Image (cartoon, rainbow, N blue to C red):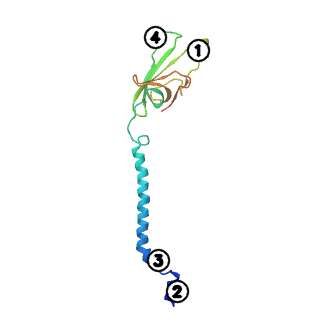
Amino acid sequence: MILQERHILNSGYDHNLIFGDNMKKIVFFLLLVLVLSSCSLIDSSNIANPTTTNTNEVVPLTSGVQTISGIVLGGGDQTPEGLLDSPRKYIYEVRIESGEEINITYTAFPPSPATDDQPSPQLNFHSGTINVGDHINARGTYDSASKTLTIAEENDFIETTPN
């Protein structure tokens, strides 16, 4: 009697023959392999894209507007002596975070009615001047041929903090 009831409930075949314990393990293993292999394809697609590759390679600055950060190595006022009440030209040597050494230059104009209305870069020096060893942040126009960042436009800036 029990065999007949089981036969009726199973609709004539035994499910354990098709989906036995070993078969369930094989199906689970195949699904696991499929999921893991699709994850590895996602990771390898990022490696093939050079814009997302993270390398330690130093990329040199290119000409154009740049923002840099680094340490002041030296420099100062480069204006010839004897020129009073004239614009003062400053050039500083800086080692930027990539290890490259560049020059930063700006010109300070004495107060006059002609220059008061002109937009000028923002200069913020923690001690009133740029000192050797200061940490410097600057934005300006970079010339890769001369390795010089020129601070001259309204949106340009130089900011120093003690190192």
Q: Residues within 10 Å of mark 2 (few under 14, many from 20)?
A: few
Q: Residues within 10 Å of mark 1 (few under 14, many from 20)?
A: few
Q: Earlier in the sequence, mark 2 or mark 4?
A: 2
Residue to which mark 3 is pinned? 15
Q: Earlier in the sequence, mark 3 or mark 1?
A: 3
Q: Earlier in the sequence, mark 4 or mark 3?
A: 3
Q: Amino acid at mark 3?
A: His
For the residues bearing labels 3 and 2, Cβ distance under 8 angstroms? no
Res. 5 mark: 2
Q: Earlier in the sequence, mark 1 or mark 4?
A: 4
Residue 104: image location, x then y, percent? 46, 24
CA gap between label 4 and label 3 equals 100 Å
Residue located at (50% from left, 28% from top): 138
CA gap between label 2 and label 1 equals 104 Å
CA gap between label 2 and label 4 equals 113 Å
Res. 115 mark: 1
Q: Amino acid at mark 2?
A: Glu
Secondary structure of residue under mark 4: loop
For the residue pair 149 and 131, the one nearer the viewer reads as 149
